[in-house]
Amino acid sequence: MTATETLNHEHKIILMVLDAAEKEIESSRGTGKIRRQTIEKMLDFFRNFADRCHHAKEEKHLFVKMKEKGMPDNSGPIFVMLTEHNQGRSRLNAIAEALGKASEGSASAIQTVIDDLSGYVELLRNHILKEDNILFPAADKMFTPEDQKELMVSFEKVEAEEIGVGIHEKYHQIAHDLAKK
């Protein structure tokens, strides 16, 4: 498996949770309430799997390698991806900040959670499309087989050293559990 195939596979797991988030948004819109525990699980997944694991692989390794191969990071696809990663983090922070009051019934906080979760889902869906259809194919053209192997080793280090052994699998299970709700 190549580095970009690994990232693409992770996108499929993230998309499962985005689907679950959309169902949660519709439920919250219908009931006027949020389910705090479910949204906390989603936040945990998005912050740790999507950001600390997946985005870390991209930001610390994939994008760096692409820059080494001549792709600028102050404009173009890498710049757009980095900007969107930061926009996603802002959305997640807004959800986390509003969650306590939302779970206590504050209508404005509930609306904030719904709006920011909805915005996050839309942002990440579009982001994944760009990566899968533009960025990753460009990377595949730039990289030698040795580059791909080097990136895979780097990705394994992210999982072992920054995330922790077995944590990746834990988040796969959380994704599957959320998808069943």
Image (tube, rainbow, N blue to C red):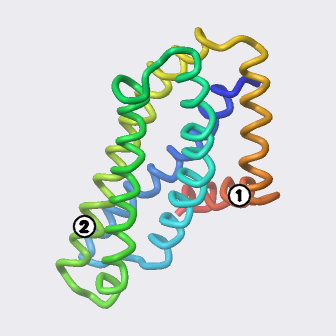
Q: Amino acid at mark 2?
A: Arg
- Circle number at residue 163: 1
Which residue is painted at 34% across and 44% down in the image?
123
Determine the residue located farthest toward the left in the rendered image: 108
Which residue is painted at 76% across and 13% down in the image?
145
Task: Judge whether 37 appears above or below 43 on screen.
Answer: below
How far from the left and from the top, in percent, is residue 87? 33, 50
How far from the left and from the top, in percent, is residue 151? 72, 29
Secondary structure found at label 2: helix
Closer-to-camera residue (174/131): 131
Secondary structure found at label 1: helix
- Circle number at residue 50: none
Which label sits in the foreground, 2 or 1?
1
Q: Amino acid at mark 1?
A: Ile
**Crowd rating for badge 2 (residues with CA inside 10 Å; few <14, some 14–19, many 20+):** some
Which residue is painted at 65% across and 14% down in the image?
143
Left or right of 165 in this view: 53: left
Task: Judge whether 79 appears above or below 50 on screen.
Answer: above
Q: Earlier in the sequence, mark 2 or mark 1?
A: 2
Which residue is painted at 25% across and 76% down in the image?
110
Closer-to-camera residue (72/166): 72
How far from the left and from the top, in percent, is residue 104? 31, 90
How far from the left and from the top, in percent, is residue 168? 72, 53
Left or right of 38 in this view: 5: right
Left or right of 135 in this view: 100: left
Determine the residue located farthest toward the bottom in the rendered image: 104
**Crowd rating for badge 1 (residues with CA inside 10 Å; few <14, some 14–19, many 20+):** some
- Residues at marks 2 and 1, CA–CA distance in whole angstroms: 34 Å
- Circle number at residue 29: 2
Closer-to-camera residue (160/32): 160
Query: Do residues under tags 2 and 1 come within 8 Å of each other at their CB atoms?
Result: no
